[in-house]
Amino acid sequence: MEQKLTAEHFYKFFQCPHWIWYDIYGDAEKKKKVPPLLDLIHKGKMIDAHNVLSNHKQFEIIKPEMLQDLDEALIATLDLMKQGKNIYHGVLMDKDWVGMPDLLEARPGKSNFGNWEYVVYDAQRSLDLGDDYKFQLIFYSLILERLQGTRPKEAYVIDPQGNERSFLIDDYLDQFHLTRNQIQKILNGEKPAPFLKSGCRRTPWYSICLAETQGCNDVSLVHKVSQSDQRRLYDIGIKTVDDLANADIEELRNKLEDWPFDKIVRFSNQAKSLITNETKILAKSSFPAVKNEVYFDIESDPTHDIDYLLGFLIKNTETGKTQYRYFFAKDKSEEPDIWRGFLDFLTGLDDFVIYHYAYYERQVFDRLALRYGAPQSLVDKFKENTIDLHAKLVDSVVLPLYFYSLKDTAGYFGYTWNDPEAGGAESVVWYNEWLNSHSDEMFQKLLKYNEDDVRATMVIKEWLSGQKPHKSKEKLETDMA
């Protein structure tokens, strides 16, 4: 039976190519169940996409019951297209291609349907589009071309505030077709080469993917090795972690002339760390001496477009005592309140530094400041006194880990979460459960997870503070670039 090509295949391919293959050819009993809400979160979608769009667009709706029969839904979609109507969740289908964009919008022009032509929209949390989302929109647009006789020049994304962003389809067509051909090979039964990336963790097949990649010690186990990096390393005979660890750094430099030398060094060091299972300190991390250290972590629900929990741990360095505090929004209407509460907290801070792990907290700060406003003095105060511990860590340390997430890193240093299954996406599921039940037990679970995150952040900072490089003869290759 011929496999139909869908937009979701492009999303899955960019997360992990094996996802597609295992869905068709894998043992279904080994497939982990992923709650639908988690799937929405990973895809950057919103529960209320219909409401988001209806705030900014007029459209007709394809009845949900019709979607059980794609042929019937296609007929209903084509009927509305002949009338020049905007359509929510219309079904586009031609031969073995099937797609369902969030919105089909009629624009002035000329097509098989009349004096209008259609473009596609997807409602997303963010206007930032990676290839996984662009290629889905291109896919919809190419089916549209087959149906209406003309290819849209642009495809669009819209965020909850009604902001729009578009891109030119022709700019990405060559890349799209290369990817489509790779997906088609997988659909036809060709299993992709072993590969491990962070996106694999979002799939229901992660444990199998990990085991297979570990089984052949593939070079993709090295942190940050991309699929194109993997192919390039294969081309020069580097297929395993051991191959990379044992390769002469200067020979690698000569064979990979277009790669930055610090990238080659980092990959080499990471491979050696995995082989020896040892931590390598490349540089001493320095931190400001202040009275108040603040460890900051934010929980967000992208499906409802809300940043619902701003949590922080305050450590008085003179006494060593810590205090966990938070601002919590019960719904979207309270988001401005927790933002003002945080700004008041920031106003009162003196002799301090704010630590966070990775870029997300700064990103949310900028988003909330743009949405609700903030005095420039406080914006400057925040940005001038924050330190990203993830950036500090990867600049100064090599750990024998596949990933450098907060949980991977702090867990390696010995920190344990109250709930071993806890994660940012899981906390969104709990928040949605709390929205339905207002259970105190679920509320405490949310707070405990956030507190674990800020305490884990503190563990990383304190561990880094106590490290310094070994003697040069004991070190790995350092950044000689």
Image (cartoon, helix red, strand yellow):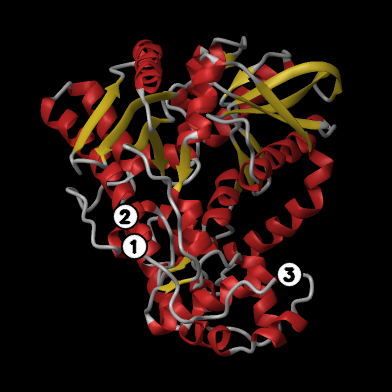
Locate the N terminus and report the quarter of the image it occupies. Answer: bottom right
* Residue 190 visible, this orientation: no
Between discs 3 and 2, the one toward the N terminus: 3
The residue at which mark 3 appears reads as: 259
Can you tell which of label 3 and label 1 is closer to the viewer?
A: 1
Q: Position of residue 347 (x, y in %)?
A: 40, 18
Task: Name the residue at 34% across, 55% down.
Answer: 460
Q: Amino acid at mark 3?
A: Trp
- Relative side of 366 to 118, left or right: left
The residue at which mark 1 appears reads as: 466
**Cα distance in 3D space between marks 3 and 2:** 34 Å
The residue at which mark 2 appears reads as: 462
Whether label 1 touches label 2, CB < 8 Å: yes
Q: Position of residue 138 (x, y in %)?
A: 72, 40
Task: Name the residue at 41% across, 23% down.
Answer: 306
- Image height of 168 relative to 87, above or below: below
**Cα distance in 3D space between marks 3 and 1:** 33 Å
Furthest toward the right, the residue is 110
**Cα distance in 3D space between marks 1 and 2:** 7 Å
Q: Amino acid at mark 1?
A: Gly
Between discs 3 and 1, the one toward the N terminus: 3
Furthest toward the left, the residue is 441
Mark 2, secondary structure of its residue: helix
- Image height of 319 relative to 344, above or below: below
- Relative side of 213 to 9, left or right: left
Task: Name the residue at 36% across, 41% down.
Answer: 425
> Within 10 angstroms of label 2, few (less than 14), some, or many (20 or more) residues?
few
Q: Position of residue 361 (x, y in %)?
A: 45, 35
Q: Quadrant of residue 47?
A: top left
Q: Nearer the viewer, residue 461 or 212?
A: 461
Whether label 3 touches label 2, CB < 8 Å: no
